[in-house]
Amino acid sequence: MKKFLLPLLFLILFLLESIFVQYIPPEVFGQNYILAPRFLFGGILLLTIYAGRKYGIIYGAIFGLLFDIVWIEIIGIYFFLFPLIAYLISKIMHVLQTNIIVAFLVSLVGIALLELGVYEMDFLIHITTLEFKSFITMRFYPTLILNAVFLLIAGYPLKRHFESFVESLRDE
């Protein structure tokens, strides 16, 4: 039964992102910001940090492909970036201590890398014409702030869940 809790958690985070996008007002705080919730990816990064590289890359690939199939016209951007950034984060965490503050900061770096990578891919294939400076002010900073709030709220419960997941794997 515990084996199904992890995919269910990530499925809930995936759905929570789409629900959040539907109910966020188009003009936040009187400005025309673009908020991109990366709750699923934040969870995948925390899974990578607390459960290991293997699980982060596997879940990154599966949910990256799901993300591409459901939301994106071009299959491959998230399918490539989710596991790649999870791998890079796992390499970074070999150097750093694994505590909640470092995990929070490294997860924000991972989300920033994802946002920059998606913007660059979209810009290269002419899906977006948004200038880089406009992207930074309209989407990048608001997205990082939104996801920082999410990580502050959900980081510790996710950490505990992933640590219990690792413990249950050891017991089997």
Image (spheres, rainbow, N blue to C red):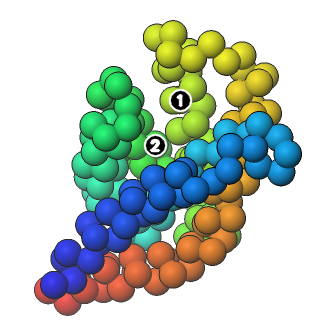
| Farthest-out residue, right | 30
Q: Please tell me whether mark 1 sits on a helix, a strand or a loop.
A: helix
> Where in the figure is residue 103, as x and y percent of width and height?
59, 65
Instruction: Report the front residue among 41 and 36.
Output: 36
Residue 127 has which mark?
Answer: none
Position of 116 with respect to 50 (left or right) is right
Q: Which mark is residue 117?
A: 1
Numbered disc 2: secondary structure: helix
Residue drawn where x is 35% and y is 85% of the image? 164
Quadrant (top left/top right/bottom left/bottom right) for the N terminus: bottom left
Amino acid beneath label 2: Ile
Residue shown at 56%/74% (left/top)? 154
Q: Quadrant location of residue 170?
A: bottom left
Q: Is residue 78 left or right of residue 136?
A: left
Tell which of 97 and 112 is nearer to you.
Answer: 112
Residue 47 at x, y percent in the picture: 41, 65
Q: Which residue is mark 2?
A: 85
Residue 112: horizontal and vertical position, in percent?
62, 42
Q: Residue at x 68, y 43 (%)?
A: 26
Residue reaching furthest bottom?
Answer: 171
Report the side of 162 relative to 159 (left or right): left
Residue 53 seen in the current view: no
**Badge 2 vs badge 1, beta-carbon distance below 8 Å:** yes
| Total numbered labels | 2
Camera-nearest residue between 47 and 66? 66
- Name the residue: 85% across, 45% down: 30
